[in-house]
Image: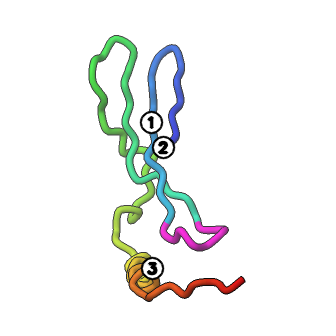
Amino acid sequence: MRCRLTRSEWRSDYRVVPFVNERDAPVYTRATYVVGDGNPGAERDTSSEVPGAREKSTATEADRVEVQQRLARPRRRRQR
């Protein structure tokens, strides 16, 4: 989450990455909400969102499955 506050508005960007295990994965703005001065409540601002950033990535799903498989494996104890 990235928030920017000015005298006229509060802008919050919900930022995501397609791969959590890649160091240089690109960062996308998935959603932006703005609260304007004198206007109660947040409103969605779609002007700064990246088209297609909401689509599900098959690589992300593969990463999720890989992590689940790793967690399901029995752990070995380290010998000292």
* Proximity of marks 3 and 1: CB atoms separated by less than 8 Å: no
**Residue displayed at 30% across by 29% down:** 42
- Give the CA distance from mark 1 to mark 2: 7 Å
Give the foreground label among 1 and 2: 2
Q: Earlier in the sequence, mark 2 or mark 3?
A: 2
Q: Nearer the viewer, mark 3 or mark 1?
A: 3
Please say if the residues under marks 1 and 2 sit with CB atoms less than 8 Å apart: yes
Say which amino acid is labelled 1.
Answer: Ser
Tell me if I can see residue 58 in this picture. Answer: no
Q: Position of residue 71 (x, y in %)?
A: 43, 80
Task: Please report whichever mark, 1 or 2, sits nearer to the chain's N-terminal start.
Answer: 2
Q: Is residue 43 above or below residue 38?
A: below
Q: Secondary structure at mark 2?
A: loop
Considering only vertical position in the picture, is 6 above or below 43? above
**10 Å crowding of disc 1: few (<14), some (14-19), many (20+):** many
Q: Residue at x 66, y 69 (%)?
A: 23
Label 3, on which residue? 67
The three-letter code of the residue at mark 3 reads Val
Mark 1 — residue?
A: 12
Residue pointed to by mark 2: 1
Taking depth in this image into account, of 69 and 8 the one nearest to the observer is 69
